[in-house]
Image (cartoon, rainbow, N blue to C red):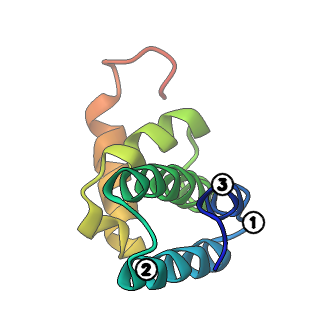
Amino acid sequence: MKTFQSLINETLEAEDLEELEAAADLFQFGIEKGYYNRRQVDEFNNAYWSVKNRYLAYEIAEKVKANKLDLITIVSNAPAEIKENKNELLNYVNGRMKALKGKISGIK
């Protein structure tokens, strides 16, 4: 079994969503075997969602013309169940972008 820190490092350096999900599966296996404590679970979840939100925002950026940092923020604040369906996430992002037009300078 990998050390916790090496698993976190690999999670943060994941090159795509498939690699990220593989790290999550490995972590889930470690949890089931009792290798990790609650603090480590929280730390892994933070790292996992940070990377996943970034990759989802990059995928959305191919379809929505907006600042990537704004997209990362919107995706990060989306409900988790929406993040599992790319069409729902795209609709959510488009809705948030329409709602924010005029309220934030720089969004057109």
Q: Nearer the viewer, mark 2 or mark 1?
A: 2
Circle 1 SS class: loop
Asked whether residue 29 is in view, the answer is yes
Amino acid under label 2? Gln
Residue corresponding to mark 1: 15
Quarter where residue 15 is shown: bottom right
Quadrant of the snapshot with the N terminus: bottom right
Quarter where residue 105 is shown: top left
Quarter where residue 101 is shown: top left
Q: Nearer the viewer, residue 24 or 79?
A: 24
Disc ID at residue 12: 3
Circle 2 SS class: helix
Q: Is residue 34 above or below residue 107?
A: below
Q: Percent from the top left, x then y, of residue 18?
A: 63, 80
Residue occupying the point 67% across, 76% down: 19
Give the mark, 3 or 2, whose residue is nearer the N terminus.
Answer: 3
Q: Percent from the top left, x then y, of residue 65?
A: 58, 45
Disc ID at residue 91: none
Amino acid under label 3? Leu
Residue corresponding to mark 2: 28
Count neighbours of disc 1 (C-alpha within 10 A) and say few if under 14, some if 14 to 19, many if 20 or more.
few
Q: Nearer the viewer, mark 1 or mark 3?
A: 3
Residue occupying the point 57% across, 54% down: 51
